[in-house]
Amino acid sequence: MYNVAVDDVKCEGCEECVNICPQEVFQMSDGKSDPANLSECVFCESCVGVCPSEAISITEI
């Protein structure tokens, strides 16, 4: 299982992570990305690579 964290200060709300994630881990909440479906993460790191503000981090737990 993985922990996906989004830094709310860095997140620009561009929705790139929402659009690229094959597991639909992210949804938008109050104009920011929210990793609402953490259990679906498969550690592909597509979201990390596409985030222009480097707001996403993924760690194995």
Image (cartoon, grey):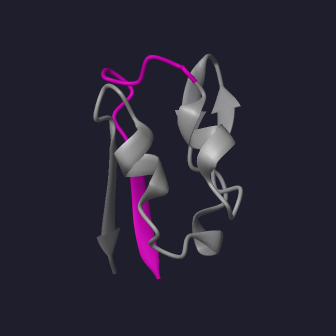
Location of residue 10 by image quarter:
top left
Looking at the image, residue 42 sits to the left or right of residue 5; the answer is right
Residue found 32% across the figure and 35% down from its top: 55
Q: Main secondary structure of the magenta part?
A: loop
What segment carries the magenta color?
1-14
Q: Above or below — where is 29 with respect to 4?
A: above
In x, y percent, where is residue 19? 67, 40
Q: Tell me where residue 14 sits by quadrant.
A: top right
- Whether 11 is among the magenta residues is yes
Residue at figure coordinates x 47%, y 83% from the top left: 1
- x and y percentages locating residue 34 in the rendered image: 57, 40
Q: Is residue 58 above or below residue 9?
A: below
Q: 40 or 45, which lies in front? A: 45
- Residue at (53%, 76%) from the top-left corner? 42
From this view, report whether residue 5 is shown above or below residue 19. below
Task: Give the residue at x 64% y 51%.
Answer: 36
* Res. 6 image quadrant: top left
Q: In the image shown, does 34 or 50 lie closer to the viewer? A: 50
Quadrant (top left/top right/bottom left/bottom right) for the C terminus: bottom left
Q: Magenta segment: does it hold 39? A: no
